[in-house]
């Protein structure tokens, strides 16, 4: 709640509905990791706000907690436009099809207002922008899909996991597998390290601190060969790049699975179909899944909440594959997992929120409950490990 609602008003109780499906995922993780070896129990609500605990983010209403994503009105609905990179700003004139100043936000909003949602999504995707229509992603029956299922080959006593992911969702999944007793190798390109290293050091350490760190000069052929050898000796690969990246490196997930190594792919909008190479981040993917506070304009729920949801789901299916000795290609989409959570959130919950002594409080049957900001876990003072 601290992260959801208008910047200058009370927090919104709307996110309360997501508690049940998030606890369901946490229960699935405990069950799967228990069969794997070490049962991992987590507070899924703490996971959902852990980045904001380090950044100090607060609620911004129709702008994301991190400030890069904004709700914009199109002709027939609302879209979330996420612009975290300088190149995204430079692409705005192409998005609206006019020679407007890239920083002329008022004129850009006006032109988007004359475009249909589907037009904004299609053009934005072609430009490599993270754009989303509210509730555009259908809800799947479960938060992941599995195909090419077959027997795996355990390479050692502790399952070996190659973590090729970055930012939040994938590293979170890898960190949870490390807690379950897996030996997790975090592989980064020395030319392009994990972007999360540019953020709070404590947050990076929280999700990556229990892994072994390896730097490779990707995409140099020798480094790709080294990566292939590492994968061949592993039990599972965690990966969060768009499908074309592995294709360019000559690594085929289906071939890896056929050789007995499981593969869990985390994408923005899925590995198949026209959106397979579409970019997404946690805030816009959540909007695509329908995780918004309805209104005019809609408001964001939490901080990039599709990331921790997808990370938790990916850890669940990965632990399940490892515990069952299965080699399969599993897919977790940020947008689809958000849609799954939204579909299982139930009816909206309404409770009075009042200010009392400088704090916002929710009026419940048992008395008022104070809304507090996320807290940083104790003991996280170690700087992030360097790439070795």
Image (spheres, rainbow, N blue to C red):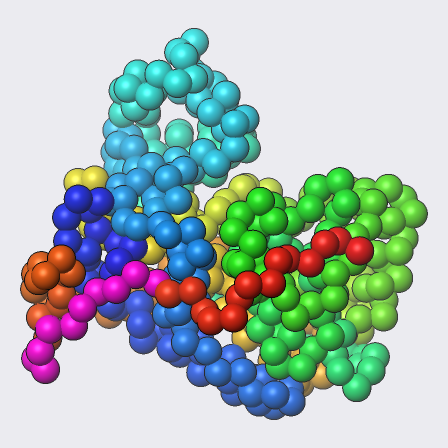
Q: Is residue 11 visible?
A: yes
Q: Is residue 306 visible?
A: no
Q: Is residue 233 above or below residue 247?
A: below
Q: Percent x, y for residue 33?
A: 58, 84
Residue at image point 26% right, 29% down:
75
Is residue 230 left or right of 350 when viewed as pictured?
right
Residue 115, quarter of the rendered image: top left
| Quadrant (top left/top right/bottom left/bottom right) for the N terminus | bottom left
Q: Percent x, y for residue 6?
A: 20, 46
Q: Is residue 240 above or below residue 92?
A: below
Is residue 31 left or right of 6 when viewed as pictured?
right
Q: Is residue 369 magenta?
A: yes
Q: Which residues are magenta?
A: 365-374
Is residue 160 left or right of 83 when viewed as pictured?
right
| Quadrant (top left/top right/bottom left/bottom right) for the C terminus | bottom right
Is residue 129 left or right of 260 when viewed as pictured?
left
Residue at image point 52% right, 27% down:
86
Q: Percent x, y for residue 239?
A: 66, 58
- Taking depth in this image into account, of 257 and 216 the one nearest to the observer is 216
Which residue is outermost to the top?
A: 99
Residue at image point 19% right, 62% down:
13
Residue at image point 11% right, 73% down:
368
Residue 49, quarter of the rendered image: bottom left
Q: Main secondary structure of the magenta part?
A: loop
Q: Percent x, y for residue 221?
A: 89, 44
């Amino acid at each position: 709640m601290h992260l959801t609602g208008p910047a200058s008003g009370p927090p919104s109780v709307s996110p309360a509905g997501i508690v049940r499906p998030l606890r369901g995922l946490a229960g699935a993780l405990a069950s799967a990791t228990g069969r794997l070896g070490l049962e991992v129990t987590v507070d899924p609500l703490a996971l959902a706000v852990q980045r904001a605990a380090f950044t100090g983010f607060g609620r911004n209403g129709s702008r994301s907690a991190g400030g890069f994503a904004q709700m914009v009105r199109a002709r027939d609905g609302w879209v979330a436009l996420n612009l975290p990179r300088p190149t995204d700003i430079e692409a705005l004139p192409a998005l609206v099809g006019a020679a407007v100043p890239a920083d002329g936000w008022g004129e850009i909003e006006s032109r988007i207002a004359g475009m249909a949602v589907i037009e904004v999504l299609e053009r934005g995707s072609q430009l490599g922008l993270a754009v989303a229509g509210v509730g555009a992603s259908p809800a799947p029956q479960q938060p992941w899909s599995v195909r090419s299922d077959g027997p795996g080959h355990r390479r050692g006593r502790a399952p070996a996991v190659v973590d090729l992911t970055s930012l939040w969702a994938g590293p979170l999944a890898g960190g949870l597998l490390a807690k379950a007793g897996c030996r997790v190798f975090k592989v980064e390109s020395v030319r392009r390290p994990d972007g999360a290293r540019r953020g709070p050091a404590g947050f990076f350490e929280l999700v990556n601190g229990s892994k072994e760190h390896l730097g490779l000069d990707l995409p140099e052929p020798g480094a790709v060969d080294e990566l292939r050898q590492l994968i061949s000796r592993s039990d599972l690969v965690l990966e969060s790049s768009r499908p074309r990246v592995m294709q360019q490196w000559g690594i085929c997930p289906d071939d890896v699975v056929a050789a007995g190594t499981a593969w869990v792919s985390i994408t923005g909008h899925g590995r198949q179909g026209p959106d397979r190479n579409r970019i997404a981040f946690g805030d816009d993917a959540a909007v695509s899944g329908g995780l918004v506070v309805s209104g005019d304009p809609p408001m964001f729920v939490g901080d990039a909440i599709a990331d921790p949801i997808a990370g938790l789901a990916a850890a669940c299916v990965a632990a399940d594959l490892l515990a069952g000795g299965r080699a399969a290609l599993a897919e977790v989409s940020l947008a689809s997992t958000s849609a799954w959570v939204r579909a299982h959130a139930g009816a909206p919950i309404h409770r009075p929120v009042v200010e009392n002594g400088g704090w916002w409080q929710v009026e419940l049957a048992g008395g008022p409950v104070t809304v507090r900001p996320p807290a940083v876990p104790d003991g996280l003072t170690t700087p992030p490990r360097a790439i070795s």
